[in-house]
Amino acid sequence: MLDIILEKLKQIVTSRLVPIALIFIILFGTLINRLFVLQIVQGKEHSKDVSLKRVKTRELKSARGNIYDKNGVLLAYNELTFAVVLEESTELSTNADRNTMLHKLITILEKHGNEIESEFGISIDENGELYFNVEGNAELRFKKNVYGRRSVDKLEEEEKNATVQEVFEHMRHGKYMFAISDEYSLEEALKIMTLRYAIYTNYPKYNQIIIASNVSDKTVAAIVENSKSLPGVEIKEQTYRKYNDSVYFAHILGYTGLVNAEELEKYKELNYNSSDFIGKSGIEKEFESYLAGTKGLENISVNNSNKYLETIDRLAPIAGDDIYLTIDSDLQKAIYHIIEKNLAGILLSKINNSMNAGTKGTSASDIRIPIYDVYYNLINNNVIDVNALKEKDATDLEKQVYNKFTTKQKDALHEIKSLLDYGNTSLYNSLTEEEKDYISYIYSELLVKGKIILSTSGGSSTSANGTNESVSYNYSNFEDNKFSFSQFLQHAIASNNIDLTKLNISDQYYNTEEIYEKLLEVLIDTLKNDSKFDKILYKSLVYSYKLSGTEICLLLFDQGVIKYNKEEKSNLENGVISAYSFITDKIRTLEITPAQLALDPCSASVVVTDVKTGEVLAMVSYPSYDNNMFANKVDAAYFNKLNNDLTGPQNHRATKQRTAPGSTFKMVSAAALLEEGAVGPSETILDKTIFDKIVPSPRDWTTHSHGKVDVTTALEVSCNYFFYEGSWRLGMDSTGKNNDQIGLEKLAKYAELFGFGEKSGIEVEEYDPHISDKYSVPSAIGQGTHNYTPVQIARYVTTVANSGKRFDLTLLDRIQDKDNNVLLDNKAKYTELTTIKDSTWDLIHEGMYKVGNGARSSTSKMFKDFGVTVAGKTGTAQESKSKPNHALFVSYAPYTAPEISVTTVIPNGHGSSNAVELTRDVYSYYFDLEDKDKLVNGFAELPETESRGFAD
């Protein structure tokens, strides 16, 4: 038996499997030992390491491209700053934790002067009331996000119609929402909600949200210091958009800002997210795809405190391309100052030291500006800050003026209560002008705009005078003395035309008189805190001489509007210099500008083109604004200031202010008459001054006949009668009768040929043109229903200057990448107008030459001995009898070999002579004919020529 066992052992030992088995045993033992060390001995440490280390994907923003002028002058660029960014953190597992952290973050930011910048559809007003700051489709998209619907169409009807309070409460306490404790105030809750909403709608989730840009070093230090208690919050480098000489280029360049929900949908294919900045307007918007560049990505490892450990891999971002414009920045800036100086000169020529407004209200021919309009508009246009008058640190003068105001306010409210008394039967014509102003304001601003009154049409009823006449109880019939304003309101109540919810009335029954008393109470309470109504009271103080011009001028010193001058102030106080002399001198020296006064004229636009290439060399709109205050984030105080500015500085007048072209349209009419055979090349027409073939019968601009005139002379002297007769002939049908529609169609045909049937071609937003579709005879002189922007008129005159090469105007010279490779070398597209004969062009050019140089032209004396020969055409367009006429002048130079065209439009500019003089200064600068420093920086001077009697 033993032998057998030994034999078996011998076989096993000598087996070839033994070494393999031994190796296997050793390896298995080693593995067991290693597992013991890792899991038992070092288990806790490794478990901690695993929990610490995780991978994150981050988006890398690209640097936005720069914008330059045609000569390489830098206009828009990026500045490196710091931003506070936020992302969802796994460390915060409950709503309470998230809200506490965000509240702390907001507190830190506000302590150091920063505000959260995230887009949110709800705001809080000065009275502590919530309101939607978006409307229409934008409001529905906001609600779609709030209620977690895939599209607006998926919203329930109740969700679509949810009030701001309902939406707010849903986000604050709704199921699966933010659970923001009632311990937070309404304002605090709204701020927390704004950030929670930003995280809630952020996609993809790994993207960090920018919540505060361009933060200070103190903010950076505070965030870093509190980083452990602010999970998900970081400081990141950020590029901040900046603009050089911003006021001159703001309308062209536009500005950038955080993308909103609507834009995210629009740019979905470009992979934008809620933390991206995009072009909001102007060149920044139109060339977004070039300027934005391409984002990069990186995968990084971080620990559980979200701190960076290492970069795993990285795809670098590609910087945006650079845009080079056709604009000459020096010319652009010079023209802005030339406009301002010329407008100031026009104002000085119209301001008089009295209450005299000239022909205002009866004719636009000689409207004047009472000095009291100047004094009042310094308040009305917020040059003088009336809110500062009641501050604790107000000067003695400010307190004195405020006391006058409070006395006036008390008296006015007492007077209004009397006017609105339930039994008051005073008719409109028995009211004073001041009382009419009060009633007009209450109706338009409080009742209509405030939506207290539901319908402005009124209802029919027996007249207030007791007759059986049916009267419509609308406001116009109150002005026609059919009933008192009190009776108007009583009828509105009786006919359920008043929104009772605006009167804080409960469901219990009230009779008409009780409702009326509630309405009166609401109106009076509203007027007590109505800044617009306050302006009416200040107007009354000025025009009743209770607030003097001297006091207003001295306020300019007290509030730092003008530079302090001890001697000037003393002379004002002691009567050595009158307020009239003081303020007109400040206008002359441009210490007070037309933009500040907001009196007609206070605006203008000039467009300069290269007639050989269709490039826009300058496109100036005055006044303008600082787009640095809009870039990256909108400065709320500045935005509010602009919105309350009576001149509308954000309005790009060169592209978005349409006027009738007036007589500047006559070159189109001349081409139509000559090409259609309505007038022969050398044919003359006798000017009878009144064209009596239609009723009402239009007149020439002067009562004196121009005699027999041909087409070139008709342009030279701007003879309306010639074009009336020509347009009449243009509308003849086959039977020899005039057909207005035929005339309009033929005029429209040539207007389209000259470019008026479409936009100008420039790369920024502009309004559509409108070719006249009524009244063929007046349409021939640029009246009718013609409506064009200055840049569209500039395209037309460029086409005239080069005899039929109709360019699509352009602002773009070229696009280059960061390695200076030209990606796009832009040339303006054009169409040759081959259907117009050379002889027609020759006659049109000759007529325009005569305007600038002819013996009979009222314009020619302004270009006498001028260093360059200018061809042009004046134009005047009437808006109303209460406002000055618009002033236009289109031109090109030099006449024999045109280089540039200049189009000048001065809304309410008192006649075309003022546009001619401004244009002359532009040519003087461009061709270096006068001292440039004096042209640009000199004081304002009175216009050389009185507009009256000047050919339109």
Image: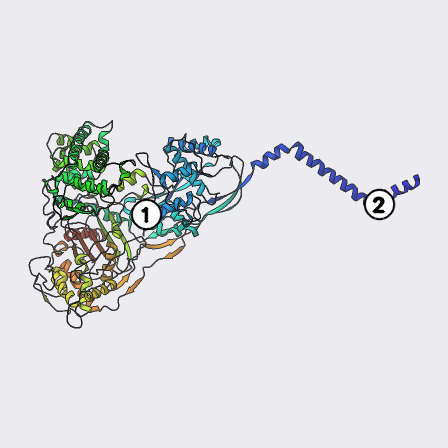
Quarter of the figure that contains the C terminus: bottom left
Residue 253 drawn above or below residue 718: above
Q: Amino acid at mark 2?
A: Ser
Closer to us: 847 or 128? 128
In x, y percent, where is residue 353? 10, 40
Q: How many marks?
A: 2
Q: Between marks 2 and 1, how big is the CA–CA gap?
A: 90 Å
Closer to us: 654 or 494? 494
Kindly identify which residue carries mark 2.
15
Can residue 334 be seen in the rendering of this structure?
no
Does residue 547 appear left or right of residue 247 in this picture?
Answer: left
First in residue order: circle 2 vs circle 1: 2
Closer to us: 489 or 228? 489
Point out which mark residue 254 bears: 1
In x, y percent, where is residue 573? 13, 30
Q: Is there CB contact under 8 Å for labels 2 and 1?
A: no
Q: Residue furthest bottom?
A: 735
